[in-house]
Image (spheres, coloured by chain):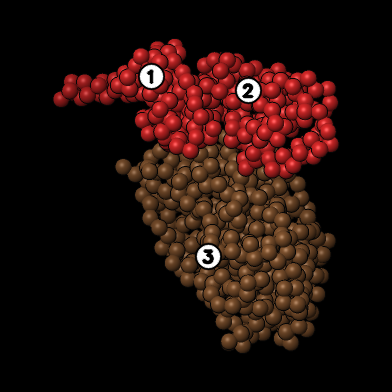
Chain colours: A red, B brown
Amino acid sequence: MIVGGIDVGGKNVHVVIMKDGEMLAKGDSPTGIQKAEAAERLYDEVLEQASLKRADVERVVATGSASKRAAFAQGMIADAAADARGVIRLIPSARTIIDVGAEEGRAIKASPEGKVLDFAINEKCAAGTGTFVEAMARALEISVEDMARISLESTRSIPMNAQCAVFGESEVVSLIHAKTEKRDIARAVHDAIAGRIASVARIVGLEKDVVLIGGMARNVGFVESLRKEIGMDVVVPDDPDFVGALGAAAAATAGVLEEEVEAKVVEKEKYEEGKAS
Amino acid sequence: MAKYTTKGLDCWGRAKELRMRYYKDYAEAHDRGALRWEGGAWSFDAIPQALEGEVHVLTEEPYGASVGADPKLQVKYQEAAEGKWGCARDLCAYMRNYWGGIVLGEYAFGGKWPRADFIFQNQICCSHSKWLQVADEIYGGTIPYFCFDVGAGPYDRIGERQINYVVEQLYDGIEFLEKVTGRKVVDEKLIQNVQNTYRSACYWAKTCELNQALPAPLDEKTMFSLYVLGTLEKSNKEIADFYEKELYAEVKDRVANNIAAVAGEQCRMLGDSQPPWGFLRIFRYLETYGVVSIASLYTFSLIGWFELDENGNVVPYPTLEEQGITIKDRDHALRLLAEGELKGKLMWAPFYGATYKNELVTKIAKQWKCDAAILHLNRGCEGTAQHQMEMKIALQKIGLPVMTFEGNMADEREFDEARAKRLMDLFLTETLGLKKIAD
């Protein structure tokens, strides 16, 4: 059975194609303004990579904040639900999932089966998201990757108290004017985001294993800040930004199976009815 | 095929008529030589309404909510208030709506802002302490103002001393009323008004109790429009009659005949706090999953009086008839009024600590057979928003799945409808395992 999962996020699209539970191909690209076109284009590219046509795929499930723009998908799944399914598939011992993407940070308490038991979201606050890091990297005139790297070299902890991205940026600018070293500012930014996200995670309760996914999980500086903030180890799977798409693909598989089960029940009922008549 | 039979309330039109007439009467009061006054919605209108002649009241919170139900109007009024004082967004959203209307000189129900002859205010929270004082200052601070405190303690700490504390202030209030209006408080009217207050508060509580039935005869979206009459003027005979003789009787009949608020009821939801008034359609959205919001401490006890029985259950506060009481005189009336408001209004208890809110809400969740809870983290009312996250934990401890969403009861700029629906989809499908039953 071949299925697809697509995660159309605020910043990037991720696609995975699975066959019988194994990854056949994957790809990502910026979402841009033309989200529907970006989703279509990437989906076709990943299919080509796997030498497949659309007709070969039994079911595609979409997730992400712009999931409705993936018109070719036959089903949709809420992003936190896709996260839980994706993470449990990769790390069955996961109980707390933290997903920090470009536009949202969220924490999920998951059951061993990958069910969402509770969740909390960093609402209306850009200061706890990947977009904030990008803005701060621009203010520091370095890449996000370099910002992540140099923050690990910092030996100073500088509290950033601003409660939103706009004031956060003002604070960074003030630190730059005060000739604070970039590595210390980078750490301050990561610590601030970690503080926001940790408070969201505490709402659902921090239970081992804590797994971090989403684009921010690729940021080693942030991962370190989060570990310190919550005082627990944080597990980061390979390709943490593909986990949502993977969860959507898992849902596609489950959907197909569910339909098969339903079809069998109907067949059985028809058979019983036929026998009775 | 629908699971249950459903139909609209027969008394719905009457509720709407009473509400619209209330706002019209207030606007036209001076044309008829009647008095106008402003005050809080939570209690004690029985006293100014006992003045000689015709008297009409405008209560603050329902007015702020009415503005809040109209997104265009609320933004206009909020911006007017912000323009005047640069109000912080965490101030009470009802209060900002109210102030904005006065700044613009507009009455949300048409015409110019109808100035009051006096203010009779009860201090239930920090906003209410200053709300009408500031509103009056827009016009120069000339309206006579009386404010009394009801912070006597939670329902289980009310004794003679607490009742005396409020009653003594009420006597001062009567002196104030007679002095500034030149009219007398008529004892017969006062006694009648207190009887009506008991009927409104107790029969609303009895109506809420009927919602324990499966299927629920009322949904919370409808209840919002019904409890409002009690926040306008619960001492009014027509309003008391509505609660006792029309609404309660009809809901009782619905329970007897298994008539549901929502035909597809499959999940009973507990709510909390005021809703985002401009977006009540989110309750209809829940219904597409067969989810019916049926209970909340706020909706029940904002006007309803309840008590805990010997088993610790939340039950309606007894009516005067059930207590075998006949009001004898002014003092008896004031004492009974204070006693009912202080002991029966459970909604005041959370102001004294999270433990009260947790205890009451978990009891309601169990007694009303709720399957889950959706809590509106209401940024527009600090009073009702306090303890919400502790309440979430308390509900989860009794096994209730809980979802929260951020919003504001009357400032649409703080509510993201698309995001709230996304959260609901996630909660309903994933955590509760529900499927849509309608589009």
Disc 2 from disc 3: Cα separation? 60 Å
* Residue situated in front as seen by the camera: A222 or B174: A222
Q: Mark 1 points at which residue?
A: A47
The image position of residue B160, as x and y in percent, is 81, 61
Question: Secondary structure beneath disc 1?
Answer: helix
The amino acid beneath tag 3 is Glu
Q: Which mark is residue B244?
A: 3
Q: In which quarter of the image is the N terminus of chain B?
A: top left
Question: Secondary structure beneath disc 3?
Answer: helix
* Residue situated in front as seen by the camera: B267 or B194: B267
Q: Please give left or right for residue A57 compared with residue B379 in the image.
A: left
- Tell me where residue B372 sits by quadrant: top right
Residue depicted at 56% across the width and 23% down the height? A241
Q: Name the residue under label 2.
A: A217
Instruction: Give above or below for B329 relative to B84.
Output: below
Disc 2 from disc 1: Cα separation? 26 Å
Q: Are marks 2 and 1 on the same chain?
A: yes
